[in-house]
Image: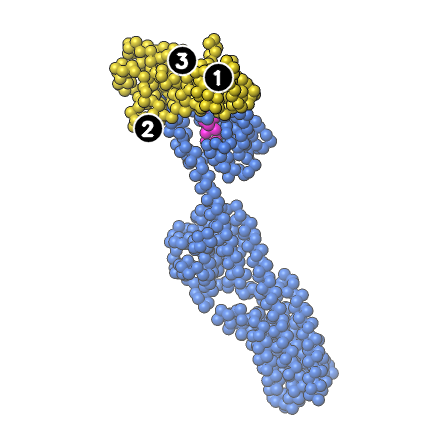
Amino acid sequence: MIRTMIVDDEPNAREDLEKKISADQAFDIIGACANAFEAIRDINSKHPDVIFLDINMPKISGIEMLSMLDKDNMPRIVFVTAHGEYAIEAFKKNAIDFLLKPVKTDRLNITLSRLKENHQPQPVITEAFPTELKFVPCYQGNRYYLINVKEIIHAYSSPTTGVHLVTGDSDQEFQTNLPLKVFDDNSQLKRCHRQHMINPDYIKYIEKLDNGLGQISTYGNHTIPVSRNFMDNFPSIA
Amino acid sequence: MQDILFLEHIAPLLQHMLVFLGLAYLFTRTPVFTALVNNSLSLPDKAIIYLVFSGFCILGTTLSEPSIQTDDAIANTRAIGAVLGGLLGGPVVGFLVGITGGIHRVFSMSSINDPINYIDIACAVATTFEGLFAGCVHHYLSRKGKTETLFSPRFVGLIAFVVGLGHITIILLFGVYTGNGVEAWNLEKEIGLPMLIANSAGAALIMYMIKEQKRACDELSSSAAAWRIADKTASIIYGRFNQESSKKIADIIQHETRVGAVAITDRNRLLAFAGLGEDHHRPGSLISSDDTFKVIRENKVLFADGINRTYQCQLRKSCELGSALIIPLRDDANNEVVGTIKLYEPKNKLFRNINRKLGENLAHLLSNRILAGHYELQRELRIQDQYKILVTQINPHFLYNTLTTIGHIVGKQPDRARNLLHYLSDYFRKNLETSNDITMLGDELEHVKSYLAIEKARFEDRLQVQIDIPDHLLTQTVPAFTLQPIVENAIKHGTSELLNTGIINITCVEHNDSFTLTVADNAGLYEKTNRNGIGLKIDERIKIRYGDHYGIDIQCEPEQWTRVNIHLPKSKEQA
C-alpha cells in the first residue's frame, strides 16, 4: 500500500480527490490536511510516501512547503493546482508531476500508475524550486505564526516537546514541526550541537570552555552550548 | 468788423450746441434712446425720433438771438435737429421734423407788429429742406446697406455742412425772388459762416455721442441677453451636440433675441430650427445653403444682410426669411468647426445690430460649452472606462475555481451543485447587464450573495458571512460593482489567507444625507503599499461621480481586522 496524504485548503477538493484516489486499492489515504501547518506536522509524524499537494494555500504555499521538508526523507510530491502557470517551469524540467484541477480520473490514473512503478523519493525536486527557507511555520499554544528565519536567534530540539525557536522579538519562544535537519539544509542557521542551532548574525562571542566544549553568547545574553562534533562550524574557536 | 460779428455770432451758437449736447446726453440715458439706434425702425421709434428732434429744432429757434445788424434774421442751431432727425428717422421723419421746426420758426418770430416776411418763410422752407435731404440720405444709405455710415460723425458733419449751404442758398434765392437780395446777402454774410460751422460741428458731436452710447448700449444689452441665454442653457450638456440639446438651445436663443428664426447645424445637417419657417426647415435634413458650407469651410462669420448680400431659402421660394447671420461653432479643443449657429430675420425686417453682436457672443458661448461638453463627455467616458475595467476584471480564476468546486460536489451533492450553477449564471448575468452602471443597493447585494454562495461552497466552514443592512436602505442607488469587488477582495486577499475561520461582516450605517457600507474581515492583511488597485479604482469612480466627499477609506489592524468603508450619498429623492 502506498501511504498517501492529501493537502488542500478546499474541503470539497480534498474529498473529491480522496474519493478518486481511494478507488485504486494500491493507495492508502493516511491523512488529509487543510494547510501547510497541519501538513508539516503530519508529514513529520506519519511519513507518507506520496503527497498530493495543493499549491495555493493560506500563509504557506505548496511550493514554499517543499523547503520545509526534510530532503532526505522527501515523499513523492504530486502538485494539484488550479493555476497552470506554476506548472510550466516544473513541467519543463520534468521534475514533478502536476495535476490540474478539476482532476480528471483518466489523468489521475496515469499519475497513480507512475507512483506504483516507482516509490523512490524525488531527489530532483530541489532543482525545480528554490528551497531556501524564509519563513518557519510555528505555533504558540493554539495560535499559528510564520516566523522570519532572520529573526530566529536560536533553535533547539527537546526529546519530549520537539523543536523550539527563540526569536529576537522579546525572547519569545515558539514551537515548530520542522526538524532541525531542515534548518541545516535550507537556512542560514548553523548547527552547534546535536540539539542546538544558532543564527550567526546574533553571535556576540564564542568561548572555549575547559572541558573542550564551547559556548556561544548571543546579543540577547543567551548562552548556547557548542559540542565537539560541531566545533568545526565555527572556525574562530576551532 | 466782420471778425467781430463772426465771433459775436459763433459764441452763442457754440453755447446752444453745448446745451444740445447736454440734452442729447441726458436723452441717451433714457430707455427711449434705443428707439434712435434701432436699425429697423418701427412706427413708435419714428414717432419718438420725430418728437425728440422737432424739440431740438424748436429749442434751436427759441435759444437763438436776434441779429445785431438785421432785426429779423438770427443765427440759430435749428438745422441740427432737422439733420439728425432726417438721418436717423428717414425721409418722412426728416420732412416732418423740418416742417415742424419751420412752422414754429415762422410763428415764433412773427407777431402783430412784425408780420411774416420772406425771411421767415425762407427759413421754414430751408429747415424743411434740411430735414428732407437728410432723410433722403438715410433712405439712400439704408438701401445700400451702409447704415453704419449714418452714425459716422464726420459724415454727419459733412451732411450738416452741405444742407447748411443749401439753407444759405435758399435764403438768398428767396431774397432775390422777393427783391430783398442785398438784405439777404448781408444777412448771410453775417450769420452764414458761424451757422455752418456751429451746425456741422454740433451735428457731428451729437452723433458722435449717440454712436458711443449706442455702442455701449449694444454691448450692454447683447451681453445681458447673452448672460440670460448662458444661464438658461447652462444645464444643457453640449458634449453630445445632438438634435435634442440643439433644439433646446435654439428655442432659448430665439425666445431671448426675438430674431425671426434660429438654426443650429453640425457640419452636414440641420440639428435644430426654431422660429419662422419651422415647417420646411426640418431638423436632420442636410444643409442646403452654400453660405453655411462656406462658413464651415472658412471658419468665418458670414452676414447676409438681405441688401448687399441676399439670403434666399433654398428649400422654399416663399420662405419669409430674408437675412441671415451665420457664425461658426468652434471646438477649441480640436481646433475645428463643428457646426454653425444661424440667426435669421424675415425679409420685411432689418437685422438688428445688437443681434449681430449677440450672435457672435452666443457662438463663443456655445463653443465654450462644446469644449466644456467635451470634458464632461470625457469624464463620463472615464466613468464608463472605470466601470468596464471593474466588470472585465472578474478574475478568470473565479470562474475556474467555481466550476472546479461544482465539479467537486456534483457527485456528492447534486442539488447544491445545480444551485451553484444558478448562482453562477446570476453572477454573470449581472456582469453582462452593463447598460446601466448605477444599480440599487438591494440588487448589488443580491450580486454579492450570489458571489458569496459560490465562495461558501469553496471554503465551506472556513468562511462565515454576516450581512446586516437595514431594509429601507436597499432602494438606495449605488454604482454597480461597488460592493462585490470589495467583498471579493476581503476573501481573496483576506480570509482565504487565514488558517482559521474567516468572518466577513457587511454592514451599513445611515447618516443624514449619506450612508456608509462597511466590509469587515478578520484577517487584517491589508497592506497599503501592496494594494491591488481595485479599491482605488472604485474610490476614483465614486469620486468622479459624486465628488471628493465620498469614496472609500480603509482601516486595518494588522492580523486582526480590515474594514473597508464605502461612503456614498443618499439618492436625491430619498435624502
Q: Quadrant of residue A60?
A: top left
The magenta span reads B481-491
Query: Would residue B102 be found to the left or right of residue B554 on screen?
Result: right
Residue wearing tag 3: A44
In this picture, is B340 found above or below A119?
below
Query: Would residue A158 be found to the left or right of residue A27 on screen?
Result: right
Q: Residues within 10 Å of mark 2 (few under 14, many from 20)?
A: few
Residue A113 location (% of width, % of height): 26, 16
Residue B282 location (% of width, % of height): 41, 52
The Cα atoms of the two marked residues, 2 and 1, are separated by 42 Å
Q: Chain of mark 3?
A: A
Q: Chain of mark 2?
A: A
Residue A226 tag number: 1
Name the residue at 51% across, 73% down: B140
- Upstream in sequence: badge 3 or badge 1: 3
Q: In the figure, the blue chain has which letter?
A: B
